[in-house]
Image (spheres, rainbow, N blue to C red):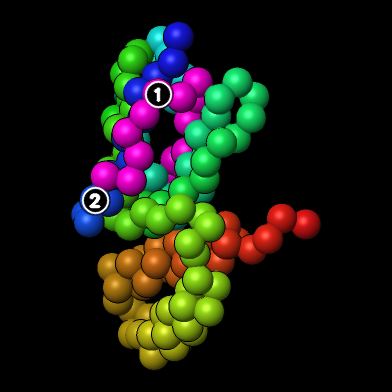
């Protein structure tokens, strides 16, 4: 029995189809959405969502955070940003990482809220770069 997975970014619906399993980057670790999963909502960190048919990964999408809503029959991922891994631009992500690192260096270190936001963005861009690198 498959599970219906939707990956939705602010721009569009990237995926809406049945899969056997979806593994996503939860804030506290990776988690799998599978048929008959207990209902759950969770925050996502920047990372890769892998869609499975049987034991084979058929598609991979980078998400830059957001949240997921899982039930026994469906998983809806509302991503801050989402893109197929094959469309990641390492050059663009690296430039964003440099800008964020400069912003971190220039930030007031007593402004914890600003530092937390910058660190979350830095970690997300690092995950994007890692997702876009060719497998070893």
Question: Which quadrant of the view contains residue 124?
Answer: bottom left
Mark 2 / mark 1, whichever is N-terminal: 2
Circle 1 is placed at which residue position? 18
Q: What's the residue at 33%, 67% (across, down)?
A: 117
59 over 72 or under it: above or below = below
Circle 2 is placed at which residue position? 12
- Where disc 2 sits, the SS reads loop
4 over 66 or under it: above or below = above
State if disc 1 and disc 2 touch (CB < 8 Å). Answer: no
Image quadrant in which the N terminus is located = top left
Q: What's the residue at 52%, 45% (across, down)?
A: 60
Disc 2 to disc 1, how far (Cα)?
18 Å
Q: Which mark is residue 53?
A: none
Image quadrant in which the C terminus is located = bottom right
Q: Residues within 10 Å of mark 1 (few under 14, many from 20)?
A: some
123 over 103 or under it: above or below = above
Horizontal placement of 97 versus 79: left or right?
right
């Amino acid at each position: 029995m498959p599970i219906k997975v939707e990956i939705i970014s602010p721009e569009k619906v990237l995926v809406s189809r049945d899969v056997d399993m979806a593994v996503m980057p939860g804030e506290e670790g990776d988690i799998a959405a599978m048929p008959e999963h207990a209902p759950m909502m969770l925050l996502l960190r920047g990372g890769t969502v892998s869609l499975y048919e049987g034991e084979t990964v058929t598609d991979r999408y980078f998400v830059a955070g957001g949240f997921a809503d899982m039930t026994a029959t469906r998983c809806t991922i509302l991503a801050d940003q989402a893109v197929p891994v094959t469309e990641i631009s390492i050059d663009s992500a690296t430039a964003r990482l440099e800008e964020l690192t400069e912003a971190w260096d220039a930030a007031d270190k007593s402004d914890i809220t600003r530092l937390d936001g910058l660190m979350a963005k830095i970690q997300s861009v690092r995950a994007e770069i890692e997702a876009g690198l060719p497998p070893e």
